[in-house]
Amino acid sequence: MAPLYALGCEGSANKLGIGVVSHDPATNKTRILSNVRHTFNSPPGTGFLPKDTAAHHRAHFVSVAREALKTAGLTSPKDLSCICYTRGPGMGAPLTSTAIGARTLALLWGLDMVGVNHCVGHIEMGRVITGADNPVVLYVSGGNTQVIAYAEQRYRIFGETLDIAVGNCIDRFARTLNIPNDPFPGYNVEQLAKKAFFEEDGVTKREPVLLDLPYAVKGMDCSFSGILGAADLLAAQMRKQDALLASGGTLKEGEERITPQDLCFTLQETVYAMLVEITERAMAHVGSKQVLVVGGVGCNERLQAMMGLMARDRGGSVYATDERFCIDNGIMIGLAGLLAWETGFRTPFEDSTCTQRFRTDDVHISWRSD
Amino acid sequence: MAAAAVETVALEHLPATHTVLLALYRNVANASFLQEQLLSRNADFEYAFVDASTVVSRFQLLSAVYKAVSAEMAGAMRTPNVHSEMVVSLSSNNNISEAYRRYGVQPATKDVVVVKVLISREGSPSSLTPEDVEKHLETHVQGDSVACSDEELAKVTDWPKLRKYHKLNGLPWIEAIKDEEAKKKELEMLIVSAMAMRGT
Amino acid sequence: MAAAMETEQFPCVLTIQVPFPTARLASVALQSLQVDKELSPLVRRIFTITPSGSDAGAGANATPDQHKTLQVEYRATTNRMLRVAVNSFMESLNLVIEVMEHLDADVLAAEAHSS
Amino acid sequence: MATPEPVAAIQPPPPPADATHEFPLPPILQRSASTAELITQGAEGRLYRTTWLAPDRFCALKHRPSKPYRHPTLDARLTRHRILSEARILQKCRREGVAVPALYGIDESQGVLSMEWVPGRPVRVEVNEYLQRRSGKYPGRARDSVARDEEGAAPLVGLMRRVGEAVGKLHKAGIVHGDLTTSNMMVRPWERNKKTGPINGSHQEDDDDTEHSLEGEIVVIDFGLASQGSADEDRAVDLYVLERAFGSTHPRAESLFPVVLEAYKDTFKAASVVLKKLEDVRMRGRKRSMLG
């Protein structure tokens, strides 16, 4: 039984990712043949709109697909077993544009189609990359915030955001401070937060100031919209201080000087502490010692460090992937699709649509039986 | 005078540095004298003189003692010393002067609970011994020394006053408890819990 | 009766004909584009494959491989809705054609052979 | 075909050498000869059984240790807030007549809460042992659900009624538990004189072998995730978690869950709205905590 090959197409948010992955059902070995990604970056201070993002995906679909095939050394599509695409969750227009491209490839090449849940893609890819067999998974991205654990052929959502996703909160926070979007807002927020440990000269050490942002965890769920509101107020206060000082004035006695660095530092300490807490609660509940962080926000070093401290205290360890896999990509969709395909799952053409809402626990994980 | 009436009490989770002495005097004749010694900060009279009618049980009394000693150890006292702290710890609200008035000895107080905490840390061992305290109380408290037991305390507890102080009236489920002992047990726990919450 | 009612509710109409080099490609385009339903209830569309324009006359007995034209009839309640739907169709159609042009099996095979 | 790049699994950081990263005991348990026994270790913290003031009075001591991953200021603020909120909720329950442990002491800076130790066993243990005795006595029925009018079912029905009453009182007092499982409800043997009090609601007459009869007062414990509020959604989720607990931990007793809801309705006037909401929560499969 030779390894099987699949092409995965991901376009649920602002990243178009197409890649070729192989999986050998006999040895359960996974190999990556190509993993190409093109990101739609809206100018600083703005978010990516569905219409523009979909236009971006359409414009780059062919070039990214061709590069993926070339890098994989695939001259003939008949080596592929199926075309996998992200069925959801995500933004409607970008999802649909990518699906049209994938559908056309499947029709042209006479292959089966497999609709994949974006989050299940992240989890399966994370499990392969890290070798963690049954971790609690924290899936944190621009569009999703979920704590998930596997039970009886389902990835069950233990805790989730009650309002906006953590990535969305960080992106919009970055916007209020006009932090650039490239490579992605979260990365730049992290760099600024690191600067909070130094004075303006970037050399002399200083103790970062923890400002006051609301910490909102309710059982295994958490909420981020309050933090966003509070951060906007602090940012406005900071601007007032900037203007006052610029015009030669001085701060009121005892008033704390607010800096972007301290704001970014506080946002990370507060938001990531919430995520680690609900993850720990899920780990305690299912009795797991392993935690896997997936999704764009999972690349954040501070989150990984904090999660590691928590896991170590429970005698376990944290697994995280680097940005090749952490951030939306086609490989994860190809892998999850191929695993499903191997168990006989197919998405009939007439059903190869997309859906913005697609709960992780709606998917039957037929390829696992532990 | 009855046999030695000052009891040394060992409290769980209390380090050896702190020794708690307890005494109960009925029909005290010189209550205003005792109060006067406190008000004039007479160093020989650093005691907790408690109006016994505001004490429900040994457990409730010792809860206040323990809370005061904990505050003293953590350097988080809100009153001058562990004895004054113990008196206010009997209250379920943060009003200190009111607490002294309500729970501390007043000229009209008939029955008085006396609490003394001897503290000896490295370098500052307590100058007093339990025997010194006992002798001092024997000479200065004009009252009948009795055991500071639940039975004795039960004789003097002024429930109506306490229910007003601790806002325990108007709880339908309490009034519905027929058995007096069961009702008192519930009230005791409500008071202890309220005391625990004080100052938070 | 239904047809009359149809025109009355959806007065704005546009029929687009897209000729393809082969019947296969026309069929691929049809299958690709008809899966996603129209987002708005104010728009109706009908996809058909018809014999290509030039030999329209031979429509009745055109051989299957002559059915190389994708025809789509859009009906909408207002011109604005018609324009929005048709624009979206054009964008998707453009992607399908681009994929055909650069990624069809024979295209890939030819490139592999020549490189 | 290009030689595919094998996916080398990223090795996780090795677990720390000092695997025995024992939590530090709270100061209160370190400063005297008094003994303490670790009962449970959850995500929140640790529960010890120790003594309080007198050596014969037991207390449940809950310690929320500081979390190394949290910024110290944030950690202290959270620990303080949570200990206080749990204490206030216990106090509010007690004042409203809900059977919960009495509060003995609070140290919010050390994150320590000491409460009355509730004798008796969790409802989970009582129900499971009842089911074992039942399948022993009636082997034929071992596999099927308990019917309400089935012979010998009265004690279990009585227990389920008292569970419903306890939850009804809790919600009536404006408290949402947040983690209502059969492990967080104790069956405390009736105290001689308290049995007739209303706090324990309706009850069966004395059975002869009381320790087998599931007799006892339902005492709700562990308010670590509790909140004050009266949102129907939150109350419905409380009931859903309890229903799931029966579903996964005591499948054969799940058939009696309607008894719990009936008692809940009898005790809590505004229950009908919550029960309707429970339907939506069931539909949505509000995942809440999956009961392992």
Image (cartoon, coloured by chain):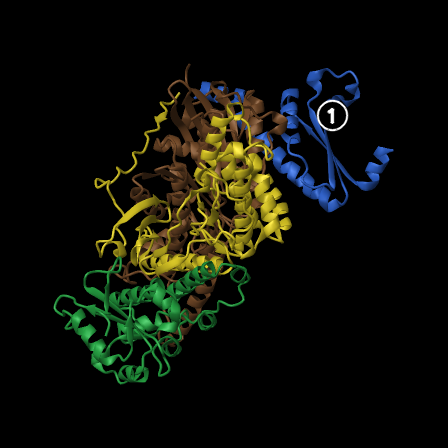
Nearer to me, B46 or A347: B46
Q: Colour of chain B?
A: green
Quarter placement of the C terminus of chain B: bottom left
Q: Chain of mark 1?
A: C
Q: Colour of chain A?
A: brown
Where in the figure is residue B62, as x and y percent of width and height? Answer: 31, 64
Query: Which chain comes out yellow in the rendered image?
Result: D
Q: Is residue C15 left or right of residue D236?
A: right
Q: Is residue A195 left or right of residue D87?
A: left
Quarter placement of the N terminus of chain B: bottom left
Direction left: furthest residue: B123
Vertical side of A192 occupied by B18: above or below: below
| Residue B117 shows in this picture | yes
Which residue lies under the disc numbered 1? C53
Image quadrant of residue A72? top left
Query: Which chain comes out blue in the rendered image?
Result: C
Q: Identify the amino acid type marked 1.
A: Gly
Image quadrant of residue A247? bottom left
